[in-house]
């Protein structure tokens, strides 16, 4: 199977005053297309930093990342933005919907960036799939947390991404709503054949993916496969 | 997969996104729009009016003069002058004019007027407007007088009544509404009265020392080059103490005079526009700061830096264009009111038309200023990292700092070029820009020092609310810098306007006490001196001054004859010195309006050698002489050798008789001379009674009633003050809008903290107190610094631009500073209203997005 994400010897340090803080150290792993992958670990273990680097949101200090066959370190910010637009979807803990756009407009944006003439139709279908057909003209402030995350899901899948990064997707939701969102996430993932990378504290959620990468103090302490139900 | 290809979202998508986002954020940008609208309205109205004024002057120049060109002099034409006039085909009309007292027979009232004796078909362009209309044509034949309409109204005189001018009583055949050659402020002091030329001699008013002007009016041949004619003839006429004026000169002179009015108004408008820019910069700064998270999200899902930058640039430019359109429309409406406001200054009716240049400028300025002043905060969208969706990054890259500096440079350059365009003087423009820069730097420096000082000396022992309000001033997301800059610059510009207005008006304030003359009698002949004094003193009125005046002209300077200096094209001696008939007095001491700046006061003997004289500094400068230099004067045919003994500065602004040249006593006593007497009349009735008697007995004596002049000047000052206040209102209104905008925008910075405190159990009173104290500190510091800085700028303006002493007014300290502080406090507190009146979650949902 072709590799969609290939991380080699990745390192990231931050400087605070005269102190150097190593957040990630010698991280290596790879993912095949269609894989589901969870990154778990305690707070401050470097999970979110790893996700940001893999998605090309930040630059590493050492090591290499190949996303969709492209080396991120060889690309400038705009090229990485285009790569994300074509191949990457995102889901965040705090939803990150554009507050001045309606639910439908939020879902349309990635498609509109690609110049897709059917942006509206595809977005309406996706909102219908996540059960928000009747709320598409509402602004984020008029939606509940669960509804906002479902809009975020629709937006994340709107450009049919090859890979989807989810940062604590249920972190801001109650258990029941969280479960529904997770179910939706895995259903859409299965339907579209997307590779899924989830950063989470929730071990139950992590166990739903094929692989779990455990981090502690910026280092990998385990990279294991799970037994799928 | 081709990643390097560009995004397929086209320009239309950028506009769509700008519109989507803008319509949801419109409310927050309303005040931003208001700042642009007011600034543009001020500039467009003034620009458009100035242009109309210039066009009108150009169009009406012949009508303003009444002829194509004139030759004028203060004495009858010399043979050479007459020959020149004959060679030009002879004058088509002529006039003698002088100031004189007239008396209205009906009620005995007297008035200083400008008597104009006219002969021939003058005016050849424009008209003498009278009521009844026919009077303008019949007064010559009927031997009647046309009297200024306002004067007639003032003195209750009607057509059919009579007026005594010198020894002749004229029937008033018409009310004079307008006449070429009279107008503006001078016509208010000595309004025109027209009589036939042939009667002038008979009035008996032409005596020694009478200041008379002889005007000869000409119609040019078709196609005659008036500029060339003027260049050829004027220097020859100069030597004969005559002067040629063409209608082109009149138009240029008028243009220059009203250009200054226009320049002042332009400056006021520019201040309004600058305040608008401060409003733009501060509201966009806070607006964009809030948008950075959304920009990061857009970048995260694939938008490029250029796309995100352009979305907000389009939004701001769109708002600027809309503001420009509304501001331009408002400005065009406003300019309609200008002729009414400036009525007192203008010599003619100004026809208002739409100036397309002003419309274009208004629209362009709207977009350009908005974009330029929004660029610094807009750059934030370019440099924000998509990583911000995962965590807040406060660090600014060195690249973004460099770009910020470039934008700052462009802003400074623009401000300089724009003020240069308005002021047409690079020194003033540069000073203006440097002044603004210093103000910004001082304000920013103080804001930064203030934050550091609080941090370092933080009063730990203070109460919770007092500590929280102080914490708000320097912790992350603080608004100290932006608000102190906005409030400070607003207060600075507003109080500079106040200070300037005050000292300009104070400059013209007239002193009045029993020892200050308020009636001045001119042209008193030597043989009349005692008789005039005897008419005054029996009434219990004092003779305060008895000033002798001798007329003379410059014959030579440092051995060079005036005619040789005139002929020398390389000479830099000012021509007016050579052509002017000086009115000179003699006395042995300095007077209150004079200060010695060179030499000593008449130290030399007046009996041996040349006579020591005293020159005012402007005459010494223009004649290019220093203490010890020799000058010869022609004192009515007798040459008198003199030496410059000392040089004085003279406060010409004082309402008293000042002289450019003063001789010592015991030199000119026997020269032909006339006198100026002054007295103080305690009330209007005494003054009227005295004037009536003097005009009856001594018709050649002109009486200037300073009380009347004072009320006239006060009237004019009121008009100036009205115009200044009217325009200052714009600047102040813009300033207030900017303040409201900035403080209102800061609401979104503070709302989450307030809600959190509320959630944690803070009482309404505590939240209110924290907010009130924070805004009180900001208001006091910003407005206090602004007013103090304006004190410095006003002092500089007074010294270098208006050359007048500066006595600071208390208004900015007592009204501007507290008013701005209270305004800031009020808006700040109203921001917290929603937090206090609604449940925390509801507030967050409503305001947080």
Image (tube, coloured by chain):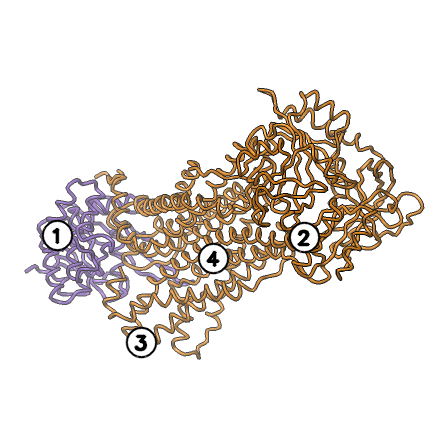
Chain colours: A purple, B orange
- Label 3 or label 4, whichever comes before in sequence order: 4
| Chain for numbered disc 2 | B
Q: Residues within 10 Å of mark 3 (few under 14, many from 20)?
A: some
| Chain for numbered disc 3 | B
- Label 4 or label 2, whichever comes before in sequence order: 4
Separation of marks 4 and 2 at Cα, in angstroms: 44 Å
Separation of marks 1 and 4 at Cα, in angstroms: 49 Å
Disc 1 element: helix
Q: Please tell me whether mark 1 or mark 2 is closer to you in this view.
A: 2
Please tell me which residue is depicted at 13% across the width and 67% down the height of the picture. A175
Q: Is residue A121 above or below residue B683?
A: above
Residue A129 left/right relative to B533? left
- Label 2 or label 3, whichever comes before in sequence order: 2
Residue B705 badge? 2
Separation of marks 2 and 3 at Cα, in angstroms: 72 Å
* Residue B838 percent coordinates (x, y): 25, 70
Disc 3 element: loop
* Residue B787 percent coordinates (x, y): 53, 61
Residue B442 left/right relative to B241? left
Q: Is residue B652 visible?
A: yes
* Furthest-right residue in this view: B608
Q: Which residue is mark 1?
A: A127
Q: Which residue is mark 4?
A: B490
Q: Which residue is mark 3?
A: B762
* Residue B165 percent coordinates (x, y): 69, 42
Residue B47 left/right relative to B110? left
Q: Quadrant of the N terminus of chain B?
A: top left
Q: Residues within 10 Å of mark 2 (few under 14, many from 20)?
A: many
* Residue A107 percent coordinates (x, y): 18, 50
Q: Are the numbered discs 1 and 2 placed on the same chain, yes or no?
A: no
């Amino acid at each position: 199977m072709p590799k969609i994400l290939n991380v080699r010897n990745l390192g990231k340090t931050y400087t605070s005053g005269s102190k150097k803080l190593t957040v990630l150290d010698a991280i290596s792993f790879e993912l095949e297309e269609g894989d589901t992958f969870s990154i778990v670990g305690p707070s401050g273990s470097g999970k979110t930093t790893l996700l940001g680097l893999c998605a090309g949101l930040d630059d590493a200090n050492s090591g290499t990342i190949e996303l969709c066959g492209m080396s991120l370190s060889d690309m400038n910010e705009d090229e990485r933005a285009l790569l994300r637009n074509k191949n990457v979807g995102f889901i965040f803990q705090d939803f990150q919907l554009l507050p001045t756009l309606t639910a439908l407009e939020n879902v349309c944006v990635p498609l509109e960036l690609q110049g897709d003439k059917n942006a509206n139709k595809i977005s309406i279908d996706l909102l219908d799939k996540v059960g928000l057909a009747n709320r598409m003209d509402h602004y984020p402030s008029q939606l509940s947390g669960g509804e906002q995350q479902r809009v975020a899901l629709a937006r994340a899948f709107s450009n049919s991404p090859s890979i989807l990064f989810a940062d604590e997707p249920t972190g801001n939701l109650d258990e029941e709503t969280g479960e529904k969102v997770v179910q939706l996430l895995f259903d859409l993932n299965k339907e579209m054949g997307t590779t899924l990378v989830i950063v989470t504290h929730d071990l139950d959620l992590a166990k739903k993916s094929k692989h779990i990468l455990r981090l502690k103090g910026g280092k990998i302490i385990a990279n294991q496969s799970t037994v799928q139900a | 997969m081709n990643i390097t290809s560009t995004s397929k979202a086209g320009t239309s998508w950028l506009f769509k996104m700008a519109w989507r986002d803008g319509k949801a954020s419109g409310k927050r940008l309303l005040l931003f729009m208001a700042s642009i609208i007011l600034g543009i309205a001020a500039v467009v109205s003034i620009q458009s009016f100035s242009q109309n004024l210039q066009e009108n002057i150009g169009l009406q120049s012949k009508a303003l003069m009444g002829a194509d060109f004139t030759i004028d002099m203060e004495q009858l034409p010399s043979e050479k002058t007459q020959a020149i006039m004959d060679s030009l085909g002879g004058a088509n009309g002529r006039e003698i004019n002088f100031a004189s007292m007239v008396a209205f027979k009906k009620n005995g009232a007297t008035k200083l007027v400008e008597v104009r004796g006219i002969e021939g078909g003058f005016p050849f362009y424009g008209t003498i407007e009278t009521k009844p209309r026919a009077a303008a044509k019949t007064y010559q034949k009927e031997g009647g007088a046309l009297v200024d309409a306002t004067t007639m109204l003032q003195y209750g005189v009607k057509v059919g009544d009579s007026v005594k001018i010198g020894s002749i009583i004229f029937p008033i055949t018409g009310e004079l509404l307008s006449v070429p050659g009279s107008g503006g402020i001078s016509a208010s002091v000595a309004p025109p009265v027209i009589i036939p030329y042939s009667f002038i001699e008979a009035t008996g008013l032409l005596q020694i020392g009478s200041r008379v002007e002889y005007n000869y009016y000409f119609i040019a041949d078709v196609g005659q080059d008036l500029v060339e004619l003027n260049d050829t003839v004027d220097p020859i006429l100069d030597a004969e103490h005559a002067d040629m004026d063409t209608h082109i000169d009149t138009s240029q002179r008028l243009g220059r005079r009203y250009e200054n009015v226009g320049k002042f108004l332009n400056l006021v408008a520019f201040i309004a526009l600058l305040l608008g820019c401060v409003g733009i910069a501060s509201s966009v700064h806070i607006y964009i700061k809030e948008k950075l998270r959304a920009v990061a999200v857009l970048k995260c899902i694939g938008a490029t830096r250029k796309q995100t930058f352009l979305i907000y640039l389009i939004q701001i430019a769109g708002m600027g264009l809309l503001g420009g359109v509304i501001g331009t429309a408002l400005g065009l409406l406003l300019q309609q009111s200008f002729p009414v406001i400036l009525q007192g200054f203008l010599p003619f009716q100004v026809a208002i038309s739409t100036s397309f240049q002003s419309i274009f400028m208004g629209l362009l300025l709207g977009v350009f200023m908005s974009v330029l002043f929004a660029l610094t905060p807009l750059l934030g969208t370019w440099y924000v990292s998509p990583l911000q969706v995962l965590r807040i990054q406060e660090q600014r890259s060195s690249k973004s700092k460099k770009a910020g500096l470039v934008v700052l440079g462009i802003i400074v350059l623009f401000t300089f070029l724009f003020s240069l365009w308005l002021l047409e003087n690079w020194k003033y423009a540069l000073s203006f820009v440097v002044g603004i820069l210093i103000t910004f730097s001082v304000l920013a420096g103080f804001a930064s020092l203030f934050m550091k000082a609080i941090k370092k000396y933080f009063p730990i022992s203070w109460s919770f609310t007092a500590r929280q309000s102080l914490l708000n001033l320097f912790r992350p997301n603080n608004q100290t810098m932006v608000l102190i800059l906005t409030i400070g610059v607003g207060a600075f510009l507003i109080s500079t306007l106040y200070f300037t207005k005050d000292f300009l008006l104070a400059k013209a304030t007239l002193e009045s006490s029993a020892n200050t003359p308020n009636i001045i009698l001119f042209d008193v002949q030597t043989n009349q001196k005692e008789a005039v004094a005897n008419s005054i003193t029996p009434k219990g009125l004092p003779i305060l001054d008895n000033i002798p005046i001798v007329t003379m002209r410059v014959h030579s300077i440092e051995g060079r004859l005036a005619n040789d200096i005139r002929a020398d094209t390389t000479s830099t001696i000012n021509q007016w010195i050579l052509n002017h008939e000086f009115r000179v007095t003699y006395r042995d001491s300095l007077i209150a309006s004079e200060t010695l700046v060179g030499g000593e006061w008449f130290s030399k003997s007046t009996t041996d050698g040349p006579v020591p004289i005293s020159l005012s500094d402007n005459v010494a400068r223009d004649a290019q002489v220093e203490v010890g230099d020799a000058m010869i004067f022609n004192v009515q045919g007798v040459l008198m050798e003199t030496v410059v003994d000392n040089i004085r500065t003279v406060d010409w602004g004082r309402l008293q008789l000042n002289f450019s040249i003063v001789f010592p006593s015991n030199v000119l006593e026997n020269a032909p001379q006339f006198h100026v007497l002054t007295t103080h009349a305690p009330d209007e009735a005494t003054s009227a009674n005295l004037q009536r008697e003097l005009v009856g007995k001594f018709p050649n004596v002109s009486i200037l009633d300073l009380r009347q002049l004072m009320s006239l000047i006060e009237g004019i000052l009121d008009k100036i003050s009205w115009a200044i206040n009217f325009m200052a209102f714009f600047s102040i209104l813009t300033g207030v809008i900017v303040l409201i905008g900035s403080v209102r925008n800061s609401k979104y910075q503070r709302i989450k903290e307030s809600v959190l405190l509320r959630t944690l159990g803070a009482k309404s009173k505590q939240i209110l107190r924290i907010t009130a104290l924070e805004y009180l500190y900001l208001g006091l510091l910003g407005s206090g610094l602004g007013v103090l800085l304006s004190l410095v700028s006003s002092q500089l303006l007074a010294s270098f631009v208006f050359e007048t002493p500066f006595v600071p007014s208390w208004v900015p300290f007592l009204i501007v500073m507290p008013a701005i502080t209270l305004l800031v406090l009020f808006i700040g507190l109203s921001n917290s209203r929603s937090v206090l009146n609604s449940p925390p979650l509801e507030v967050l949902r409503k305001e947080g997005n």
